[in-house]
Amino acid sequence: MPDTTAYDAIIGLRCLICGAEYAPDEVRYVCPHHGNEGILDVRYDYATLAARTDRNALGEQRSMWRYLPLLPVAEPRFIPSLDVGWTPLYRAARLGNALGLPHLWVKDDGRNPTASFKDRASALAVVKARELGEQVITTASSGNAAAALAGMAASAGLESVIFVPASAPQAKIAQLLIYGATVVLVEGTYDQAFDLCIEAANRRGWYCRNTAYNPYMTEGKKTAAYEIAEQLGWDAPDRVFVAVGDGCIIGGLHKGFADLLALGWIEHMPRLMGVQAEGSAALYEAWRRGTDEVTPITPHTIADSISVGLPRDRLKALRAVRETGGAFIAVSDEEILAAMRDLARLTGVFAEPAAAAALAGLRRALADGQVHPDERVVVLVTGNGLKDIPAAMRAVEGEGKAVRLPPTLEALEAWLARSTA
Ligand SMILES: *Cc1c(COP(=O)(O)O)cnc(C)c1O
Ligand SMILES: [Zn+2]
């Protein structure tokens, strides 16, 4: 099936609020009747896709583009050359032992080209910009989406203009600068950067990748669900734990598993478990109250990638959890730092704080009796630990095993004798 895509099987882009449906060339981002809130969902004719696509004939490509037959790409020649996706799904036996979960896997999306899950969406954004003939692409981001877009733009020869909070971690800002992006360090929150980016894009005609504004970001993110299913031999897991900020990743996982269910490629929907930081838990609170009305908060957490005052993809995120029988969970920064340590020590996977929150959420869910020991569970690690060195140093504060010594065997032996005594 080389170069077949799902573009011609798109029924329409449907507004989450009013249900109005648009052809792909009729709207650029959102439903015109609902301003920036009118997020669109790309809908497909599954009968057509099922008839011409075979899960056993996806080809050899070891990237998210192995699923091109299920992706809304009009021009495959615009796909950037960096290898995004097809990240490893590790069986986590030692971590599983420690948790009393024999069937546990860790999917390491920190292995993507710019070291986070966001590459999946940014790769598709670059394709869409090039299909429209745009030269400049922009996004607002807490850091990782920005780095991902800057990297994908560099790979495709596009210019990028990036809006990040001035407080974003240094490593993420360094990524932007090294990829040659124009970087606007917004003296304000991510939420303010988000609005400024949309205004600038509309004024200047730049192509805007903003999460929960550009309808194709969910479509890029859904590829992680496809991979989890395929890597488990098309036997979907019982639960997936994932960190949630804006809610686009969890919405993307929902979309991906829903696609596979509609195609008959998997037999059940995993329960999606959205993990938020206690200091940034607007979705958790709305879910607990059983409402779609999300109350904005002033976020405060060490997990910068999920530090969001008003989650932009809240409808998709709440739907993902409710419709799959999952749950939202809130974890403290202390639990996140402990999860960073334990994930690294028991699996060898080094996660940034937001990514480690997924494991902290699994721990909470186990403690609360929400997960049965026989369940098959996947923890999705969304970003690499090297993205935030100060957080990693905090995670080992007071209990790391470093010692400063002169370069002699005597000094080493003396210290070892003392420390093991
Ligand atoms: C963006 C991000 C998340 C959260 O994704 P949302 O779509 O905002 O919910 C989680 N972890 C990492 C590392 C991220 O970069
Ligand atoms: Zn609408």
Image (tube, grey):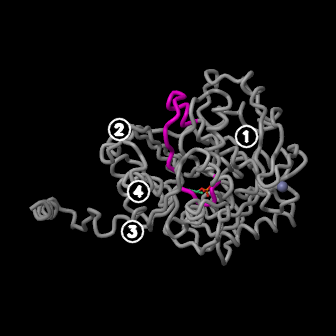
Picture mark count: 4
Q: Is residue 105 magenta?
A: no
- Region of the chain picked out in magenta, as a range: 227-248
- Which quadrant holds residue 414? bottom left
Residue 100's disc is none
User: In front of the other: label 3 or label 4?
Assistant: 4
Rendered position, 268 above or below 180: above
Within-10-Å neighbours for mark 3: few <14, some 14–19, many 20+: few
Amino acid on which the number 4 mark rests in the picture:
Arg
Read off the residue under disc 3. Answer: 394
Do callouts 2 and 3 mark residues in contact (Cβ within 8 Å)?
A: no
Residue 364's disc is 4
Read off the residue under disc 1. Answer: 79
Q: Secondary structure at mark 2?
A: loop
Q: CB at mark 4 closer than 8 A to ligand 1?
A: no
Camera-side residue: 307 or 148?
A: 307
- Left or right of 328? Residue 63 is right
Read off the residue under disc 2. Answer: 102
Question: Residue 365, image x and y in percent?
Answer: 42, 53
Question: Residue 129, image x and y in percent?
Answer: 80, 49
Mark sitting earlier along the chain (4/2): 2
